[in-house]
Amino acid sequence: MNPLKNIALGLLVIVFALASFAAEGKNVSYKSGGETVQGMLYTPPGKGPFPAIIVIHEYWGLNEWVKEQASKLSDQGYVALAVDLYRGTVADNPELAHQLMRGLPEDRAKRDLHAAFEFLPTQPKARKDRIGSIGWCMGGGYSLDVALQEPTLAADVIHYGHLATDSEALNKINAAILGIFGGNDQGIPPESVKMFEATLKQIGKRVEIKMYPDAGHGFENPNNKAGYRPDDAADAWKRTITFLVDTLKK
């Protein structure tokens, strides 16, 4: 057989094998109070059980970029539930995104996140004692809310989300915290990040903060044409994975 054909066939086998073992997302529904909410669940191949993560979208809604992040987490060995706080609506422009974010009832969002926290342990491949949360932008702030309201949460990742600095509130947190922020973020000033970190350390909580000095808000998302910083985004992802391994897999 032609050597080039051998190589081509070998590559096809590899591609097929990778596709066969790739994590697949599926639509799921679960109860939140008296309502039924939707999400996308990504489960790693293999027997498990695996640590689980709540994945919380930006102010755009549950779009393809957030689903991609959940899929990537599943590829790393986590059962990932990408929640949909907007009930199926996805913004394609900043005006609608702001409208959706402002119109989202905070109590409903927190209730949905609690429902997600209770739903994940019911999945056959999910570990009940190793659940984390991660979010970006608006979702970063809500990821912190998960840590504030779920005392058994093991790990919490906040990507440029709004922060609480009250020590009494933060004292409720038992999860290890990783915060990823941009030094040029006009909505989340570095001073508030420093206060957040100092308060957590003062009350004995585990916290890691990484500030990217030249990055603005949303620097990890390539759809942010003006503010995307690929090198910083790659480093932030690497730090996130390292943190999750340390807190959820050990």
Image: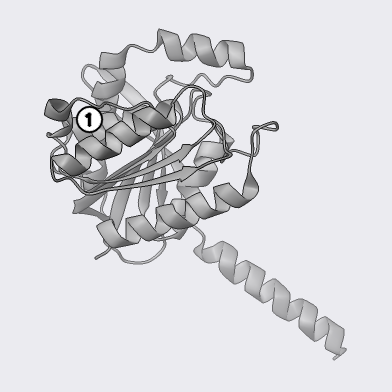
Secondary-structure class at tag 1? helix
When the figure is inspected, residue 22 is found, relative to residue 83, above or below; the finding is below
Decide which of 248, 45 is in the foreground and name it.
248
Residue 184: image quadrant is: top right
Task: Give the percent coordinates (x, y) of residue 156.
Answer: 29, 43
- Whether residue 249 is visible here, answered yes or no, is yes
Residue 157: image quadrant is: top left
Q: Please indicate whether residue 26 sits to the left or right of residue 219 in the image.
A: left
Decide which of 55, 28 is in the foreground and name it.
55
Q: Residue at x 15, y 27 (%)?
A: 169
Quadrant in which the N terminus appears: bottom right
Residue 217: image quadrant is: top right
- Whether residue 29 is visible here, answered yes or no, is no
When the figure is inspected, residue 186 is found, relative to residue 41, above or below; the finding is above
Q: Residue at x 30, y 15 (%)?
A: 106
* Colouring of the image: one colour
Identify the residue position indicated by label 1 in the image.
Answer: 114
When the figure is inspected, residue 115 is found, relative to residue 106, above or below; the finding is below
